[in-house]
């Protein structure tokens, strides 16, 4: 089955056209992409990156007004393949309590995703634009599937989902810990299992998705049992521009002292904090590492230290929660490409048996999507790995499973 995967972000759309083959025992194999690419910088001058089996890598700069315009441009590049596409899979950030598995998109599901935009105002509207744009091109009969970032975390126990707030407020306003980055964490766990041959049903994992957005998840028997992001993606680790965990009273305090609305303080926590706020110069970890090393920038160095400290604190907490772990898995732009950050996070963890190999860790950079490498010593227990998360492959597999279940 040929599947088009669309991953719509707040200012970008990534796509991949793949062939998914069902094996004899019902398992699915996703073959290398026929064509893939991304439009980045929607709302201005955007870059269109393309590569595939029959075309070389290319980058084109275009004026892109909005997501609907971006999708028309992308689908123009697929004009010769549109008739062969049998399903479309969409990443959708927030599924709330309603959508606990990947779901065939109907008019009712579209309305449900739209209603959940109040919980994810920066993300769900762009996901919905991708869905509606694809529907306008492909018509009403082609199956389209929503794969929800929050769905992977639906397996968390109630004690991990709830905040200690008045129950009547929680129920009235649907306040709970939803968790995000679920597709990435599921992909990291799958990549670990494929590389090691260890079945997820017998494994305890701690997965770090470290990029501009960052989260960590505790996985037992292939199921998420705890994760760092909560009601919104703001909770948890220090991120590129997000603060991560803060005392909730800070919001009201800053609103009063700075004479601004609460919404403005929340914007500061989401857009001006994290690595950017700490360093005063950048949310890009590569730039901060360079500044700390070459310029002895103390603020950059402190930002890096706090980033790693918070990650190590969560690592220790999740080891306690799981009663130990079989492996620690790093993914995301920072997790895959910054050996120094991985080393700092795992520093002084010998008490639990974790020991990185300097040479393996330094060599594990730039892995192709879906590939993995061990970065711990052979004696380390837990072991540590880098997995290049492959969200599009995961979405393609979920799309075929959903369509296959409906057909059967």
Image: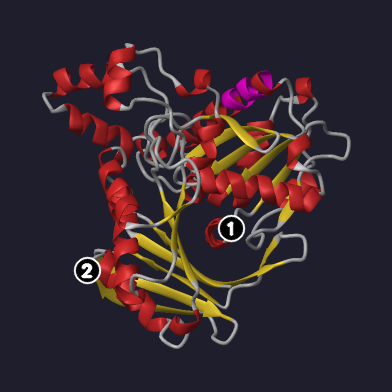
Q: Is residue 350 left or right of residue 3?
A: right
The structure residue drawn at horizontal position 67% and vertical position 18%, both measured from the top left corner, is 320
Q: Is residue 105 left or right of residue 381?
A: left
Residue 314 on the magenta segment? yes
> Whole-percent x and y of residue 7?
43, 60
Q: Mark 2 or mark 1, which is nearer the start of the sequence?
A: 2
Above or below for 145 versus 384: below
What's the mark number on residue 401? 1
Q: Which residues are magenta?
A: 313-320
Q: Could you say which is closer to the camera, residue 389 or residue 273?
A: 389
Q: Mark 2 — residue?
A: 65
**From this viewpoint, is residue 18 visible?**
yes
The structure residue drawn at horizontal position 66% and vertical position 58%, both measured from the top left corner, is 370
Q: Are marks 1 and 2 in contact (CB under 8 Å)?
A: no
Q: Could you say which is closer to the camera, residue 44 or residue 31?
A: 31
**Separation of disc 1 and disc 2 at Cα?**
34 Å
Above or below for 120 versus 3: above
Q: Which quarter of the rendering shows the C terminus?
A: bottom right
Residue 251 on the magenta segment? no
How are the colours assigned in the image?
A: secondary structure
> Whole-percent x and y of residue 396?
55, 62
**From this viewpoint, is residue 338 visible?**
no
The image quadrant that residue 341 belongs to is top right
Q: Could you say which is closer to the camera, residue 8 or residue 148?
A: 148
Q: Residues within 10 Å of mark 1 (few under 14, many from 20)?
A: some
Mark 2 lies on a secondary structure that is loop
Q: Is residue 372 left or right of residue 81?
A: right
């Amino acid at each position: 089955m040929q599947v088009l995967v669309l991953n719509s972000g707040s200012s970008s759309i990534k796509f991949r056209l793949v062939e998914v083959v069902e094996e004899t025992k019902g398992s699915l194999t996703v073959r290398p992409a026929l064509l893939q690419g991304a439009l980045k910088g929607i709302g201005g001058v955007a870059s269109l990156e393309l590569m595939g089996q029959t075309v070389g890598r290319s980058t084109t700069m275009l004026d892109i007004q909005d997501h609907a315009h971006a999708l028309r441009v992308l689908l123009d590049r697929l004009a010769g393949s549109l008739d062969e596409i049998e399903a479309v899979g969409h990443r959708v950030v927030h599924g709330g309590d309603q959508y606990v598995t990947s779901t065939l998109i109907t008019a009712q599901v579209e309305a449900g995703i739209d209603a959940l935009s109040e919980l994810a105002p920066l993300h769900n509207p762009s996901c919905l634009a991708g869905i509606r744009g694809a529907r306008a091109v492909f018509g009403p009969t082609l199956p389209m599937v929503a794969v929800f970032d929050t769905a992977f975390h639906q397996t968390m126990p109630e004690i991990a989902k709830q905040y200690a707030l008045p129950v009547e407020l929680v129920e009235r306003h649907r306040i709970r810990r939803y968790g995000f980055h679920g597709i990435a964490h599921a992909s990291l766990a799958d990549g670990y299992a494929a590389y090691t041959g260890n079945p997820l049903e017998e494994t305890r994992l701690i997965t770090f998705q470290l990029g501009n957005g960052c989260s960590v998840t505790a996985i037992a028997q292939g199921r998420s049992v705890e994760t760092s992001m909560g009601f919104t993606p703001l909770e948890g680790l220090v991120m590129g521009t997000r603060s991560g965990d803060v005392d909730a009273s800070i919001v009201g305090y800053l609103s009063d002292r700075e004479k601004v609305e609460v919404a403005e303080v929340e914007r500061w926590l989401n857009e001006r904090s994290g690595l950017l706020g700490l360093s005063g110069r950048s949310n890009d970890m590569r730039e901060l590492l360079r500044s700390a090393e070459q310029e002895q920038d103390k603020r950059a160095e402190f930002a890096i230290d706090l980033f790693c400290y918070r990650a190590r604190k969560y690592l220790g907490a999740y080891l306690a929660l799981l009663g130990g772990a079989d492996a620690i898995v790093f993914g995301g732009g920072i997790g895959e490409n910054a050996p120094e950050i991985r080393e700092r996070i795992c520093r002084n963890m010998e008490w639990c048996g974790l020991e990185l190999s300097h040479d393996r860790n330094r060599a594990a950079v730039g892995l192709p999507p879906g590939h993995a490498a061990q970065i711990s010593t052979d004696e380390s227990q837990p072991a540590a790995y880098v997995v290049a998360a492959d969200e599009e492959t995961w979405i393609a597999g979920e799309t075929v499973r959903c369509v296959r279940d409906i057909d059967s």
